Amino acid sequence: ALQSAADLAVGIGASEIAAQSLCELGYSEALAGRRPSAARYLEDALGYAKNNEDCLASIHAFIGFNFVDWGKVELGVSHFQQALELARSAGNRRREIWALGIGARGVLLAGRPNTARDWLIQCLDLCDDIRWLAFRPWAVALLAEVRLALHEVSNSTQNDLEEALALSNQLGDPCWQASTARSIALVQIDAKNYSEAGKWLAHSRERCCSVTDLYAGLLVEILTDQVRLSQLCGDDQSAASLARDLLPVVAKTHADGHLDFAMSALTGTKSS
């Protein structure tokens, strides 16, 4: 339906509809891990968006989303920064929240946890300000991961995650359920509660895979965490078995930043 809309809009010169349709097509492809086609759709969308700041903010955010999961992290973050500037200029707070919350993952992967924390705190403040509660679970889950990187985990971190998981369950959102359960698992790993962490990662993977249109980048992260947990437990056989699950997903979804780890886990060698 989106492809038909895009084709018709291009044919009659309806630039705004063409840009929006191509933008949504690009996001759908990026979510599924089809990186090259996502990049093409989003590049085409830029050509039709002209000076529409709202639409441009979405396109740049989705380009950033695609690049980060492609392993082109710094390039992705630069597009998230453009998305933020455009969303703020347009006064579109929901687009600003999305760029802050999803973009913070790229900032974290770029090795800047302090900045990622600032983005997520801004994101949560804006969520509360406009009462966009449905977006909070993602930001809370990612903030816990950032706090782990900064060694700032406290009892309140676990409480916040439990509240976010409850909200995710109430919303019935498998992606939010999976991301929150994953962060709970990461907190348990940090506390060396490996058995409990394994249960949460299994639940996270089950939730992520409960829909056909799953978020491929999140599945890669969950599988990677399962491999790492098996390695921590000294279970090389399970680590290799999980790596056999991970490697084809990495290859299929162009998760280039995870390729070395997946290969090394499969062969039992340490990645550089």
Image: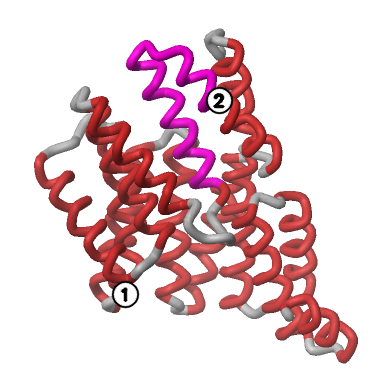
Q: Secondary structure at mark 2?
A: helix
Nearer the observer, 177 or 66: 177
Whether 227 is among the magenta residues is yes
Q: Quadrant of the N terminus?
A: bottom right
- Quadrant assignment, res 246: top right
Nearer the observer, 135 or 46: 135
Q: Residues within 10 Å of mark 2 (few under 14, many from 20)?
A: many
Residue 132, which numbered label?
1
Q: Residues within 10 Å of mark 1 (few under 14, many from 20)?
A: few
Q: Identify which residue is drawn at 56% across, 22% down.
A: 261
Q: Is residue 50 visible?
A: no
Whether 93 is among the magenta residues is no
Earlier-in-chain disc, 1 versus 2? 1
Q: Identify which residue is drawn at 24% across, 71% down.
A: 128
- Type of the residue with mark 2: Ala
Image spot of residue 105 (x, y percent): 44, 46
Image spot of residue 98 (x, y percent): 45, 64
Number of marks: 2
- Type of the residue with mark 1: Trp
Q: Is residue 128 visible?
A: yes
| Residue bearing the label numbered 2 | 243
Q: Identify which residue is drawn at 79% across, 70% down.
A: 47
Image spot of residue 68 (x, y percent): 58, 45
Q: Is residue 176 left or right of residue 103?
A: left
Q: Is residue 132 left or right of residue 87?
A: left
Q: Determine whether 163 is above or below 171 in the image.
A: above
Q: Quadrant of the C terminus?
A: top right
Over which residues does the magenta segment extend?
A: 217-243
Nearer the observer, 176 or 206: 206
| 1 or 2: mark nearer the eye | 2
Image spot of residue 126 (x, y percent): 30, 69
